[in-house]
Image: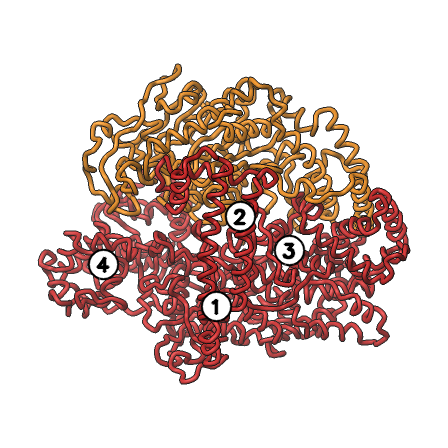
Chain colours: A orange, B red
Amino acid sequence: MKDQPQRNTRRDFFARTSDGILGAALTHMLCHDFFGGTSALAAEPTLAKPATQYNLQPKQPHHAAKATSVIHLFMNGGPSQMDLFDPKPVLNRMDGKPYPGNVEEIGNSNNSAIGVMMGGRFKFARHGDSGMWMADVLPHTAKMCDEICLINSMWTDHPNHDNALYKIHSGRLFMGYPTFGAWSVYGLGSENQNLPAYVVLNDPLGPPKNGTRNWTSGFLPPIFQGTRFRPSGSPILNLKPQYEQPSAVTESARGLLNQLDEIHLKDRPHYPELDARIKTYSLAARMQMSAGEALDLTRENQRTLSMYGVGEKWTDSFGRRCLLARRLVERGVRFVQIFLEEQPWDSHADLAANHRGACQRTDKPVAGLLRDLQQRGLLDSTLVIWGGEFGRTPTTQKSVDGFSGRDHNMQAFTSWMAGGGIKGGTTYGTTDDFGHKAVGNPVSVHDFHATILHLLGLHHQKLFFERSGLEERLTGFEPPRVVKEILS
Amino acid sequence: MNSYCSTILFLVGILSSMLNQASHANDELPVFESDIQPILAKKCGKCHGAKVRKGDLDLSSITGLHRGGESGEAAIEKSVDESPLWIMIDGGDMPPEGEPRLTSKEIARIRRWIETGAKSENPSATAKKINQHDVLPIMLLRCVTCHGPQLREGELDLRTRAAMQKGGKSGPAFVAADPDASLMIQRVETEACPPRELLLKFFVRRPSSTEVEVLRNWIAAGAPEGDVTMDVATSESDPLVSDDERRHWAFQPPKAATDAQSIDDFIRKKLIANDLSFAVEADRDILIRRAYFDLVGMPPPVEEWKKWRSSEQPNWYRAMIDHLLASPHYGERWGRYWLDVAGYADSEGGVSADPIRQVAWKYRDYVIRAFNEDKPYDRFLLEQIAGDELLDYANAEVVTDEMVENLVATGFLRMGIDETGSRTMNFVPERLGVISDAIKVLGSGVMGLTLECARCHSHKYDPIPHRDYYRFKAIFQGAYDEHDWLTFKNRSLDVATTERRRRVAEINPPLTKHLKQLESRWKQAVAAMQMETLRQHYPAQSEADRVETLRALSIADNNRTQPQRILVEKLQRADVVADSQQPATVLEARLAIQVIEFDILQVRRQMEPPLAIRALWDRGEPSPTYILRRGEYDKPGRLVGPDVPSVLTNGRTPFNATPPFAGKTGRRLAFARWLTEPDHPLTARMIVNRIWYHHFGTGLVKSLENFGVKGDRPSHPQLLDWLAIELIDRGWSIKEMHRLIMNSRTYRQSSRITDERQQVDSQNRLLSHMQLRRMNAESLRDSLLFVSGKLDDRQGGPPDGVSVDRDGMVTANSTADGGWRRSIYLQYRRTEIPTMMDTFDYPEMGPNCIARNVSTVSPQSLMLMNNRHVRELAIAFAARVDELIIDPNNDDHGARVELVCQLALSRMPSDRELRLGIEILIEMELAWKGDRSAALESYCHTILNSAAFLYID
C-alpha cells in the first residue's frame, strides 16, 4: 500500500483512469460538464448519518500490508480433502471396511446412511520443489504448487451447508453478520473509486447456496456489502438504461439534474449527504464507463485467454471470471469473490465423477490466474484463497445409486492460500489417519480470518464496529491466532 | 473467556517473587474460618458477601466458595493453579483497581490454604450435595421428548423424581443406591435409549459421559431430593443488584418538571443558554410537504396542497395535522416503523429454502389497524405480549373478533428467524435462538435494554445479572418451551369467528379444486417448456436423455449422479441464453407458463384467507427454567422462576403471576401489566423517544435501543420525562403525541443550517433547526407510484408477490388493475427483498431493526436513472401532466414545468427552475425530433431523480 509504491504502478494507472487515455478524457468531460466540476477522483459517497460518515476512500492499515487485494475462489459444497490434497494411505488400505470406531463420531446428519471406509479416489503425486502432494485431477494447479500454501487442518463448527457457509464467510453460524470481504473494505476502503470496492462474480448457471447472504455487510453500513456483477448480460444491475433515449436527451437530462441538484445543495449548506449524493451520480456515470472497460475481456490477447482456458468447453465460464478478477484487482478493487452455482463440490453420490467434473471446470483457470498474476507482478500483492465451507467424511454415504460419495465433515478440510505474504510450497497442519479430524496445528475459521486480515495489514482486535454499545469483531470474543507459520 | 473474567472479578498484580519472600509464618495448616475468612471479609466482602454478591459469588462462607460464581465453577479446586479464586488473585485481576489490595502475606496465606487442601472447621459444608435438580435438566434434554408431556412411552414420565420412582411398564426408573440395577442407567448405557432411529426424528442427542456420570452419582447417593426453591425475588434485598445501581436515570420513573410546560419551553431554554433562538419558521409549502411525509409517507394530492396553502383559516395547520391523522394511510406509515421494531418478515429464514410465512400479514394488518385506531400504547403492548392470556378463546362458546385480534397481536414475538421447522435444525440450541430473538426484540424495541448481553454472563455494563436473563426467559417458558417445542409448522392456531368459518367452508373448496388443476397444468407447462428448450438447443440429443434430464430435476441436486448433473447443467446453460437468442417456440412455451401463473394468482386472490393465526400462546405446562451457564444449552445451573429484571424493581417485590383462566400460567400477562404500569421507568420514555426520532431524525436519546449505562444520555432529559408523562396522561395516545410535537414551534423550524448554528450545534442536539431527511425506501417507492398515478391504494390482505428475473432483480408484481400497492403490502421474503427496497436500505432483520441506515451509494442512482420500471412510472407521470394540462396542443412549456413541480415537489418552481425547465423541454423536444410527449417524459424522469424529490426539508 502506501509503503510499497513501486508495486502499485500498474494498479495506480488503472485506478486513476477509467478507460485508458480516452477514458480519462471522457470521464473528465462527463464529470466536468454534467456534474459541475466534481472531480473524477471524487470521494465515494458517504452515509447520510449525521454523526458517523462512512466511505470507501483508501484507509491506512494497522500495520504494513503484505497483500492489498484479495481474490477468494469459493468452492461451494465442500471439496474432499482426502481425495485432493491430503493423501491417507491408512484410509486407502481400509477401503471397503467398516468404520473402526463409533459411527456417531463421524458427525453426519444421518447415521443410518453411513457406509464403509472409502480410500482416496484419485492418484496422488508429489509436485514442485516443495514436493507438495496433489491429486492427478489438479494437473494445472499442481504446477503452481510452489506458490501455494495448503492448510490441511481447517475445521469448522457446523455440518450443515447453510450454517457452515455463514461461518466461513462471516465467522458466525447465523445470518446477518458481515462477511470478511465486507470487513476488509470497511477497514481499508478501495484503491479504485470508479468501481465497487468489493465485487462478487457468480456463476451464470445460478447463485450459490445462501445467495446474497454470502457477501452481505450484515450490520455494517451497506456500502461495504459485495456488489454482485451479473454473470451474464450487463454485469451491474441498471448499469445501462433499460430504455431507449437519444444520447442528446441523456446529456440534457444529466445537465438539468446537476443544475437542479446544485441549486438544491447551495440552498442547504452543511448537509454533506447532498454533496455525497451528487457524487453518487458521477460515480454511477464513471461506472457506466469504467466497468464496461474493466469487464471487456476482448482486450486480452489470445495467449492470456488460453492460459485461463477461455474458449474451451469446460473452462470457459470459470476462466472468464478468473480473468475478470485479475482485471479488477489490477484496477485496485480490494476484494473479489468468485462463486460456482449452488454447490457442485457437494458429492454425496458419485464423488469421483463429481470431483473430476468440478476440477475440470476450475483447475486450469485457477492455475492460469496464479500464473498470470505472477507474470504481471501482481501475485506479491494479491492474496488468492481457495476453499469451501467444510470437508468430507472418510466413509461413504448411502445415496440413490448406492455408496459412492462422502458426507459433510466439519472436523477437517483443506483450504489453500497463495500470493501476498504467503510462504509458497508449504503444507500446514495434519489430520488423523483417515483425514477425518484436524489433529496437528488445527486452524479454526477465526484463525483463518485473522490471518487474512493480518496479511491485509489489519489487526483482528483493532478492526471493530460499535453496535449497541458493543464492539463487534469478525473474529468474535475469544482471541484467534494468526497462523504465522505460513507467512513469508 | 471474557465472560469469566467479568464475573469473577479483577485484581492488582503481585509478582511471584514476592510470594517466595513471604515465608510460611504459621506452620500449622490454615483453616478457613480462622485464617482465610477474615482476609476475604476485609478485602473482598464489599462485593462478594452474603448480602451483595457480585457475579453471584459469596466469599463469606466455605459453602459460598465451593458453590462459586455464575460460571458454575467452584472458586477453589484441588490444585492451586486450577482454582479460579487463585487465578484472579495471582493474575492481578482482584480486588479491582481502586480497592485496597491484598498484602503479600495475605496472598501467601491464601495460597498455602488452598495447597494444603482448603481446610474448614465444617468439612461437611464443603461437599456439594447432589439432588434431583442435577438430574432433571438432563432428563429434559435427553429423555422427556418420549417420556414427558407429549409422549409417555412405556407409560413412563421422567419429569419429576416421584414420577421416575413410580416408573413405567418395566418398573421404576431407578433403584436408589444401585445405579447398575437401575433401568434408566441400563437403557442409556446400552444405548437402547434414546433409540438411535429416533435421534433425528425428535432432535435429541445422547447424554454425554459426564451426564451419565451425574445420573449414576445421584442414584448411588440414594437419589436424594433436595429442598430447592426456584430462585425469584423475595422480600429480602437482592444481593446481585444494589440500590446504587438502580440510580441510573433510566431506571428511575420519569419525573414531572416544574418549570416548563411545553416542548418549546424545554427546547428554548437550552437554545437561549447557548445564545441561540429558534430558526425561522419553515414556509407553508415546506410545512405541508413535511407533515404529509411525516404522517402518511407520501406527498399531498395537488388539490389538498392547494387547499392548505391558500387557506386563510388561522388554524389551517392544526386542521391539516388532524386531517392527516385521520387518514388510513397514517397507519401504513407508522405501522411500518413498528414492523421494523418487531422484525416483520414473510419468511422463516435460517435455511436456504427460506419457507414463506403464509399468514404473517395478519399481524401486519393488525399493526396498521392499531395505529389507525390510535389504540392506546399500553393496550397495544398488552395484546402483543399477552393477547392469549386476556380472553379465554379456547373454552369460549362463541369466538369473538376481539379474541381473534388478541391472538393475531401475539405474532409480535413470532417474527424472528425460525429454522426449527427444517429437517435438521430443530435441536435445543436452535430453539433457544428463537427465544433469544424474541427477548432481543423486547429488549431493543420496547425496554431499551441490551438484555441479550446477559445470556452468557452478567451484563458487562448494566446491572443485569446472568440470573435475570433466565428469570426473564422463564416468563416465556409457558409459550416457548425448548423442551416441549412447537415448530413453525405446527405453532399456529385455527381460532376464528363462526362467520369466518362459514365463509372459508363455502368459498374455498371449489377454488382449491380449481387451483389444484391449474397447478398440475403449470407443472405440465414447465415440463413442456424444458423439453422444448432441450429440443431446440440440442437437436442431436436423444429423447431418452431429455426425459432423464427432467427426471433428474426432481432429485435433490446433491443426490444427482454425475451423468444426471451433466444433463441438468446442459439444460441450465440453454436456459440462461439471452431472451433475444431463444427460439420462438421456447419463448412461447414460457409465455404459456406465465399465463397459467397469472390464472393461479387470480384464483388465489379470490380465496378467503386461511383461518390460521401465527400466534404465541401459553400452553400451561412450562418446563422448569434453569440458568444456562455461559449460555450453553447443556450446562444447566440454578433453577429460576419467572421475573423481570431486578434493576427495574426495588428488588424486594416478588413477581406475581396468576393464571387468568384455566390452562395459562399468566406469566406474560403479569409481565405485560408490569411493563405498562404508569410509573414504569422505560416503557413510555422508549416510545416517545421513538416517535421523536421519526419526526426529527434523531432521538432525544440517540441510542434508541439502549437506555442503559452505555447508552447515550438524553439531550433534554426533562423534556423526555415530560413527554412520557404527557403520553400516559393522554391515555397512552400516540396520535396525541404527534399533535403535541407537530404543533410545536420546534417542529415548525426551517431545516436550513446557518453557519452560526452549525458552529454551536453541529450535531443538532440542541434542536436549533429541523433536520433534512431522505425518504426511506417505502416512502420513495410509494411516492413514485403516487406521483405517477399508479398507486393502487387498497389496503390489507395477503402480500403482493414479487418476481425474480434471471439477473436476480426482484420486482413487485402489479395488481390486477395494472397498478401497485404501497410498499408495506409487498412480500418480504428474507431472501427475496424487492431490489428497489434493498437498494434504498430496507434492513436485514436480525432479528429486528431499531434504526435504519441511510446510505448514499451509486446503485441508487443507477436504479433511479436506468431502471425500466422507474422509467415507466416517469412516462405515466408525464401522461398525467398532459392530461391535467387539458389541451395537449398547448405549447405552454411553463405550465408543464409548474405542474410537474406541484405534483412532485408540492411547490411552485423558482424563477430559475422555471427558466431551466422551459429551456430543457425545448432542447429535449428537439433531440426527440419534435416528440413533445417524449420530451416531457424525459423531463419528468429527471425530476424524479432530483434531490428536491428525494429529500424532505
- Name which residue lies at 51% across and 47% down: A471
- Where in the figure is residue A402, as x and y percent of width and height? 26, 40
Q: Secondary structure at mark 2?
A: helix
Q: Is residue A46 left or right of residue B391?
A: right
Q: Secondary structure at mark 3?
A: helix
Percent x, y of residue A475? 46, 41
Asked if the residue at tag 4 contacts the one at tag 3, i.e. Cβ–Cβ closer than 8 Å, the answer is no
Tell me the distance, in whole angstroms, between the alpha carbons under discs 1 and 4. 66 Å
Residue B511: which numbered mark, if any?
A: 1
Badge 4: residue crowd in 10 Å (few <14, some 14–19, many ≥20): few
- What amino acid is found at the position of numbered circle 3 in the picture? Ala
CA–CA distance between discs 2 and 4? Answer: 75 Å
Mark 2 lies on residue: B589
The chain containing the residue under callout 4 comes to: B
Left or right side of B910 for B406: left
Depth check, front residue: B473 or A44: A44
Label 4 amino acid?
Lys
Q: Nearer the viewer, mark 2 or mark 1?
A: 2
Distance CA(mark 2)–CA(mark 1): 26 Å
